[in-house]
Amino acid sequence: MSAQAVQHHAPPTSFLRKHVFSLDHKVIGKQYYALALLAALCGMVLSWLMRIHLGWTNVAIPGLQLLSKSGAPGGVMTPELYLQLLTMHGTIMVFFVLTTAPFAAFGNYFLPIQVGAEDMPFPHFNMMSFWVTFLAFVVLMSSFFLGDGPTLGGWTQYAPLNAVGTAAGPGQGLGVVLWATSIALFCIGQLLGALNFITTTLDLRVKGMSLMRLPLTAWAWFITSCMGLTAFAVLMPACILVILDHVAGTSFFVASGLVINDQVLPHSGGSTLLWQHLFWFFGHPEVYIAIVPGIGIVSHILITNMRKQMLSQRVLIYCMGALAVLSYMVYGHHMFVSGMNPFSSLAFSFPTLVITIPATIVVLIWIFSLYGSKLRINSASLFALGFISMFVSGGVSGFFLAQPSIDIMLHATYFVVGHFHMVMGVAAMFGIFAATYFWFPKMTGRMMNERLGKIHFWLSFVGAYCIFMPFHYLGIAGNIRRYSSFPNDFMQPLIPVHRWITVAALMTGVAQLIFLYNLIHSRFWGKPAPDNPWEATSLEWSTATPPPWDNFGGKLPVVYHDPYQYGVQSSLGDYVMQASPEQVVTQHDEK
Amino acid sequence: MAKLLALTIIVIAITSALPVVLHTWEAPADISTHGHLIDEQMSETMIEAGLSFLAAQLILAIFIWKFSSRGPEAKLKTFPGGAKGLVIGALLLVGAEVLALGVFGVKAWADVYLTPPSTTAMPIQVQAGQFAFYFRYPGPDKKFGPLHPELINEGNQNFFGLDPEHDVDSRDDIVTAEMAIPVNKEIHLLMHAKDVGHSFFVRELRVQQDFVPGLDVSLHFTATQVGKYEIVCTQLCGLGHYNMKAYLYVLSQADFDDWLKKETAMQ
């Protein structure tokens, strides 16, 4: 389909159409970003509360009673409130931040521009996608104020704890129903988004934009959409089945003969492990849904700042594809000690180990592409380099967890928490920060403050290591995760480590307020941005800053070059834009 | 600034590796017959992952140091061998590493999960419920009586739902809140969940296994050192999860026999 087949929609005229129920992918992208920012703030505050409690269990936290009266008598957090905050932190961060920001926010804003389209093919679906996601967030947060609070079952919501109702604890009735409703809505939003992303990439590329001329970010969003289409399509029905177990008397996830409070539960015939299979069939691809956009973003930003291409763009694309395919074959490594057939554990272990090969190749391509570059240091490139360091640190701990025998020791310990926070939490957040510093000028027409950006980077980079590297050591010592305090004899000596982590977490958290200030201040009072401040080549830098409602002012570009023509001689300097017909001379490489 | 970043990455990498290299932070000593296999696998993985971690961070730091903020007159260079060399290198090196870890790891896993317990293993049933473990020994008849969920009553301490009036096999069953086992004797642990998911984890024994509601699973191990250890729940099971624990006493055969007699008398 040619770019002429884009569904044209008239320029928005009313306030509502322009800023609220907009069909414009750029406004929707900004809305997703704002939602992710709000969610990240909520998630971060919850993590502060949890960390204070873990460091000093009996300390009264001012204002905690506003969140839950019964969960914080005298301001001291109860075990159930701790678990409720833990569940909400995980759910908010995984779904509404790590999925929403790098994929839905930046993807929405830049994918159509990078392929040279005026908008996505289904703008109404796109608008629905955001508002359904927003509704999902509202439903999730409402659980703080309804019934006996949010569910305490963790973001993984294992069965049958998620299906047996309030008898199993506060939040396990209405709280679970609201959680499952929220996630099912979120899945619908992401499915609508994925459909748009895939069709945009395949059908709306402008003249000259072959698939291999797509920037790495566009490839990353495309591959992520394909993963999302399959993964969310499994999680959504699983959530519906949980809701049915609560409201319709079904027993999908509850076995016969279970007893709570000396009462036999009125369920029979369900399967506990069924939930785990359904959840992790979504859950492991979700890790890559969070991180693959980051891989694309980091590659895109590094290339621009290295002033040279990656050693191989094609290999990077193949590796992202391999990660996506393998992500479905490895999910069972979350279930090594779950009680599933032990032969299955071995079957899931090998692809889990094998998935390190494409991940290693990606890292090697990044690092060895730095060789011989002219690396520019700015806030965006600092966060991109920080991403690589974090991705490596979080990635190598995966070697341990991929092996069932070692998992016997490390499963459900802080080692796992350290691993996933580094590789999909901090790394993905660094990708979001890098993208923000890089694209903010294009999105708002103003530059962010570089000095504040660099301070933000240093505090975040060192702070994140101070928080999450000790998690691995706690795990090796057998510190169990999801404990609201540590009454066990062997955990007593570990409490000082928890206090160190708490202090580091609070300080790193404060650094994020610098980012927030920078973001808001620059939005209104930042220096005006030129159209192409980073001397970059892809199509988003060919159009005005910020782009007009139809992206290219009514005249679609024609693509003449591969996405990353750096290190060339052109009228602009050492680069040539994708949409420039200028012939270029490649500079001779010095070996 | 780039040089500072390079130095920071090097300092972080070395500091992170120090506790492992200097052996100042290690897992608790193993007290099982199979645990050394897991520990060896852990050590091999630590060496391979640790070297990969250090190499990647150091090379990243060196390249950031060397190739940042070069002037416009500097020439771009391509890493000798290009992507092809890296891909082949990664496939061979990581492939070999993955294969080695995968193949050798099977042995440790098989020792715990793929070999059945011996016929002389001592059966003990453990039941996990919110938020306590209870243990059942079969008594002189060496048979466990059947469970009746409807008879479970915490108030009259019928934790398992036994019916000794009607079930002969239940009459000599011994129910305890602590677990004691004889040293150097293989234990066949029969795991039963009363309500929701739980887990059985003893660090020193190198065993961890989830309880699956509706599905009885088993585990077998042999403890080699007398002592007192903690059994903890590692599967989020509700508000009291953090406090769900029991003690494991590994006793000499004589001490174990005494303990069992005392517990029998208290039933």
Image (tube, coloured by chain):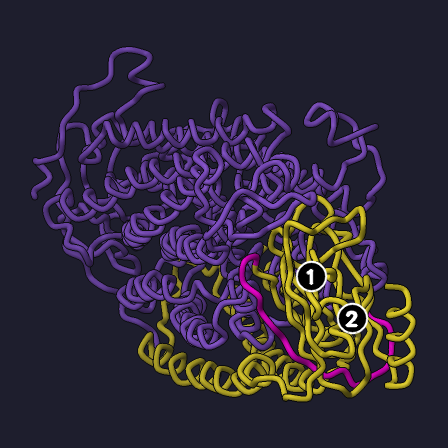
Q: Nearer the viewer, mark 2 or mark 1?
A: 1
Residue bearing the label numbered 2:
B172
For residue A272, which numbered disc appears in the image?
none
Q: Are marks 2 and 1 on the same chain?
A: yes
Question: Percent x, y for residue A158?
Answer: 54, 51
Q: CA distance from mark 2 to mark 1?
A: 13 Å
What is the letter of the yellow chain? Answer: B
| Residue count near mark 1 (Cα–Cα under 10 Å), binned few <14, some 14–19, many ≥20 | few
What is the letter of the purple chain? Answer: A
Instruction: Using the image, name the chain to which the residue with label 1 belongs.
Output: B
In this view of the protein, which residue sits in the foreground, A85 or B193? B193
Vertical side of A459 occupied by B192: above or below: below
In this view of the protein, which residue sits in the foreground, A68 or A47? A68
Q: Which residues are magenta?
A: B213-229
Residue situated furthest top in the rendering: A14
Q: Is residue A400 left or right of residue B78?
A: right
Residue bearing the label numbered 1:
B166
Residue A167 appears in which quarter of the rendering?
Answer: top right
Question: Percent x, y for residue A229?
Answer: 29, 48
